[in-house]
Image (cartoon, rainbow, N blue to C red):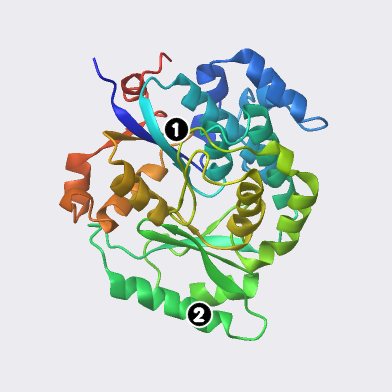
C-alpha cells in the first residue's frame, strides 16, 4: 500500500502549556536521544524534570530557555514517530529550528543546541508581542481589513519612541512586536474583539530589528559547522524552499541566525508554498499543542487551496493530522 505524502509543520513558542505537561514522557520515542538533549543543557534544568513536574508554571515552563527546549524535543520526537512519506518540512517561528533537524539540515543534537541557545538568549531580548485577527469568525479573507491594521502599525512605528512591526503573518492573525510604547499604542488604537488584541506572555519582539543584538550573539555562539545541506525540502519563513544540494551551509546559517531573527516570519507564505509546490495528501502538525491548526487552515484558505473560502469549508475538507490529538496520532503512524 502506498503511504500518504505529508508536509510536516513544526510549532513555535507558546505551544507547551498545562495540558502538554508530561508530553515527552508519553510520546518521546528515543530515551537515549532525550538524555543527550539533557546533556546539552549543562547548568539548566533537565527536560525530564520540567516535563515531569507536578504542575505547570508559566514562569518556569514558558520561559524562553525552557520553552524552546521542551517544544523542540516534543516536536522532533513526534517527527521520529511518523510513518508517512514526508515530502517537505516547515515550521512557525521557533519551529524553524525543529524543521532544520527534521529536514536533516542539522543533526538532532545540533538542532536542539541551536534552539536551546537561541531560547536562552531570548530571555534577555527586548520588547514583546501581541496577536490580533484580520479575518472574521467565518475565516473569509478580508484584505482591506488586514491592510488597515498594517497601516496602523506603520503609523504607530513612525511616532518618536514607538517601535512596532509585523512579527509573524500567521494565517488569519497578525502577530505584532515592538516596545511597550508601540504595543500600547496599537492596543489603544484598535477596537477590542473579545480577548484581542492579546499580549503574549514571555515573548520578546521576535522577528524584528530589535532582535539584531540577539542575532549577533547567536552568530558568535553557533558556527557554520553545525549546518549542512538538507536531505528533505525545507520551506522557510519567506515561503522559499531550500532544496537538497541547492544551497550552502553558510547560506542556511545566515538565514537561520540573521534574516529570520530580525525580519518578519511569513507562516502564511510557507503554507502556501507547501500546498502549491508539494500538494501533499495531508499536512501533519507535530506536537506539542494544537493551536497551529487554525492558522494552517486559514493559510490554506488565503492560498485558495482547492477553492476553500471559509471556515466551514476548511473544516469539512480538513487535510490536517495533529499528532497532539490522541485520536489523530495513530493516523500519522505513531504508536503512542
Answer whether residue 190 is visible to the viewer in this image: no
Viewer-nearest residue: 149 or 279: 279
Which residue is pictured at 26% across the width and 37% down the height?
319
- The answer to whether residue 262 is above or below residue 108 is below
Pick the front one: 141 or 184 = 141
Q: Is residue 167 left or right of residue 39?
A: left
Measured Cα–Cα span from mark 2 to mark 1: 34 Å
Q: Residues within 10 Å of mark 2 (few under 14, many from 20)?
A: some
| Disc on res. 286 | 1
Image point (67%, 81%), residue name: 161
Q: Which labelled disc corresponds to residue 154?
A: 2
- The percent coordinates of residue 258 (x first, y second) are 65, 57
Residue 108 lies in what quarter of the image? top right
- Residue 302 in the figure: left or right of residue 107: left
- Report whether 13 appears left or right of 150: right
Residue 216 at what x, y percent from top left? 75, 57
The numbered disc on residue 131 is none
22 or 37, nearer to the observer: 37
Q: Position of residue 3 (x, y in %)?
A: 29, 21
Q: Earlier in the sequence, mark 2 or mark 1?
A: 2
Measured as percent of width and height from the top left, residue 19 is found at 49, 32
Count of numbered circles on the image: 2
Q: Which residue: 28% across, 41% down?
A: 279
Q: Residue at x 34, y 32 (%)?
A: 6
Mark 2 secondary-structure assignment? helix
Q: Is residue 15 visible?
A: yes
Q: Is residue 172 above or below residue 154?
A: above
* Quarter-of-image position of residue 45: top right
Quadrant of the frame with the C terminus: top left
Label 1: how many residues lie within 10 Å, few (<14), some (14-19) or many (20+)?
A: many
Image-based side of 225 in relation to 202, left or right: right
Q: Quadrant of the N terminus?
A: top left
Amino acid at each position: 500500500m502506498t503511504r500518504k505524502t505529508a508536509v510536516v509543520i513544526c510549532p513555535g513558542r507558546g505551544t507547551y502549556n498545562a495540558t502538554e505537561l508530561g508530553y515527552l514522557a508519553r510520546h518521546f520515542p528515543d530515551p537515549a536521544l532525550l538524555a543527550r538533549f539533557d546533556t546539552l543543557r549543562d547548568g539548566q534544568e533537565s527536560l525530564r524534570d520540567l516535563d515531569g513536574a507536578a504542575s505547570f508554571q508559566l514562569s518556569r515552563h514558558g520561559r524562553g530557555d525552557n520553552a524552546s527546549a521542551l517544544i523542540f524535543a516534543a516536536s522532533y520526537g513526534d517527527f521520529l514517530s511518523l510513518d508517512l512519506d514526508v515530502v517537505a518540512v516547515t515550521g512557525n517561528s521557533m519551529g524553524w529550528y525543529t524543521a532544520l533537524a527534521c529536514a536533516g539540515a542539522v543533526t538532532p543534537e545540533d538542532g536542539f543546541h541551536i534552539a536551546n541557545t537561541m531560547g536562552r538568549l531570548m530571555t534577555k531580548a527586548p520588547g514583546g508581542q501581541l496577536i490580533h485577527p484580520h479575518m472574521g469568525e467565518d475565516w473569509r479573507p478580508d484584505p482591506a481589513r488586514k491592510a488597515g491594521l498594517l497601516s496602523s502599525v506603520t503609523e504607530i512605528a513612525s511616532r518618536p519612541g514607538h517601535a512596532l512591526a509585523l512579527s509573524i503573518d500567521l494565517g488569519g492573525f497578525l502577530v505584532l512586536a515592538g516596545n511597550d510604547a508601540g504595543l500600547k499604542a496599537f492596543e489603544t488604537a484598535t477596537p477590542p474583539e473579545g480577548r484581542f488584541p492579546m499580549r503574549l506572555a514571555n515573548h520578546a519582539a521576535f522577528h524584528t530589528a530589535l532582535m539584531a543584538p540577539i542575532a549577533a550573539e547567536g552568530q558568535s555562539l553557533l558556527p557554520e559547522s553545525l549546518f549542512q545541506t538538507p536531505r528533505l525540502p525545507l520551506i522557510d519563513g519567506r515561503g522559499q524552499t531550500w532544496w537538497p544540494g541547492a544551497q550552502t551551509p553558510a547560506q542556511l546559517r545566515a538565514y537561520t541566525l540573521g534574516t529570520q531573527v530580525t525580519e518578519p516570519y511569513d507562516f502564511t507564505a510557507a503554507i502556501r508554498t507547501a500546498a502549491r509546490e508539494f500538494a501533499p495528501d495531508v499536512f501533519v502538525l507535530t506536537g506539542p499543542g494544537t493551536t497551529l491548526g487554525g492558522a494552517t487552515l486559514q493559510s490554506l484558505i488565503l492560498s485558495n487551496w482547492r477553492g476553500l473560502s471559509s471556515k466551514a469549508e476548511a473544516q469539512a475538507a480538513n487535510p490536517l493530522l495533529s499528532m497532539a490529538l490522541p485520536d489523530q496520532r495513530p493516523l500519522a503512524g505513531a504508536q503512542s
